[in-house]
């Protein structure tokens, strides 16, 4: 099959899985959106997905992302940055992206806030939650989240939308669900303390059902749409 057909089929399959999980876990229809993770994939693959009315794309590698954003600047794409953030690279992120899922420090948030051009809509932010509290993983701890959310809510030109997490893989569906539940609980705690959050960026190809069962509103899927990645540039 030509690559185009495979990508179209894969998007169809991903949408069916999402819809089935929404039904199974009593979620509102269409309450979970699909973020197509296009890192390392060519712009032609993004254009194919766009023909399927897929508008949200996620990128991890900055130089590669800026090249694609420039090439595709006339397309109605919503760009999400989901990679690690070095604080000296925040300016182009603030200029070129619509969403950033991987904010875990006030320093980065403050820079994104001051560097977001006033001519653009507010930059959408998710706080990355280190749910497993692994020292090797990036993301804020539960204690840090509440403080960060309050500080970030006060900053102009960025809008705190919710949490993102990349938990370690669990052995079983129930164990995966328990980890996702902890993220959902953290989100609910922030909502209960006055933050109007509407986004939970949770779940990938292998575990999107467990994530949707626990309230995910955005699943991030790469290889299951575009096929295997070339190595990172
Ligand atoms: C690469 C990546 C994904 C997609 O992973 P796949 O295995 O390609 O589906 C999702 N989220 C983040 C943060 C990623 O870096």
Image (cartoon, rainbow, N blue to C red):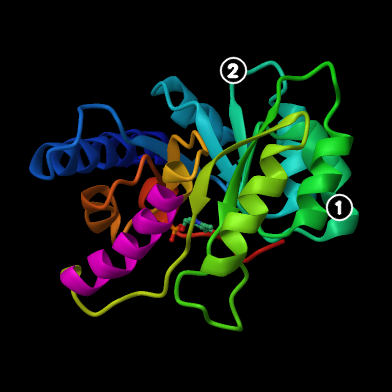
The single residue placed furthest to the left in the displayed view is 24
Of residues 200 and 106, the one drawn nearer to the viewer in this rendering:
106
Residue pointed to by mark 2:
76
Of residues 144 and 54, the one drawn nearer to the viewer in this rendering:
144
Q: Determine whether the beta carbon of the residue marked 1 sits less than 8 angstroms from the nearest atom of ligand 1.
A: no
Which percent across, then down, holds residue 71? 74, 28
- Which mark identifies residue 178? none
Which percent across, then down, holds residue 60? 65, 54
Q: Tag 1: Cα neighbours inside 10 Å, few (<14), some, or many (≥20)?
A: few
Q: Is residue 27 left or right of residue 191?
A: left
Q: CA distance from mark 1 to mark 2?
A: 25 Å
Which percent across, then down, holds residue 48? 47, 29
Which percent across, then down, holds residue 29? 20, 27
Q: Is residue 133 magenta?
A: no
Q: Is residue 143 left or right of residue 209?
A: right
Residues rendered magenta in the picture? 174-189
Residue at the spot 53% in from the left edge and 82% down from the top edge: 134
The answer to whether residue 42 shows anywhere in this view is no
Sequence-wise, which precedes: disc 1 or disc 2?
A: 2
* Location of the C terminus (image quadrant): bottom right
Residue 65 against residue 143 in the figure, above or below: above
Residue at the spot 50% in from the left edge and 50% down from the top edge: 163
Of residues 209 and 160, the one drawn nearer to the viewer in this rendering:
160
- Which mark identifies residue 89? 1
* Location of the N terminus (image quadrant): top left
Of residues 61 and 5, the one drawn nearer to the viewer in this rendering:
61
């Amino acid at each position: 099959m030509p690559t185009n057909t495979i990508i179209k089929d894969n998007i169809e399959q991903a949408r069916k899985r999402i819809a089935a999980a929404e039904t199974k876990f009593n979620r509102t229809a269409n309450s979970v959106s699909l973020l197509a993770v296009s890192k390392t994939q060519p712009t032609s693959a993004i254009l194919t997905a766009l023909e399927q009315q897929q508008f949200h794309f996620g990128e991890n590698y900055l130089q590669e992302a800026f090249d694609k954003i420039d090439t595709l600047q006339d397309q109605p794409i919503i760009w999400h940055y989901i990679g690690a953030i070095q604080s000296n690279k925040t300016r182009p992120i603030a200029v070129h992206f619509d969403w950033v899922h991987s904010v875990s420090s006030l320093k980065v948030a403050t820079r994104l806030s001051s560097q977001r051009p006033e001519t653009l809509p507010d930059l959408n932010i998710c706080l990355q939650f280190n749910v497993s509290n692994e020292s090797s993983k990036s993301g804020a701890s539960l204690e840090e989240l509440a403080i960060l959310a309050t500080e970030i809510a006060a900053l102009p030109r960025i809008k705190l939308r919710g949490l993102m997490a990349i938990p370690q893989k669990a052995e079983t569906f129930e164990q995966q669900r328990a980890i996702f539940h902890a993220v959902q609980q953290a989100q609910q705690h922030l909502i209960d303390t006055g933050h109007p959050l509407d986004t939970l960026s949770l779940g990938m190809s292998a575990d999107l059902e467990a994530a949707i069962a626990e309230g995910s509103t955005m699943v991030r899927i790469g290889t299951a749409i575009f096929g295997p990645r070339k190595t990172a540039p």
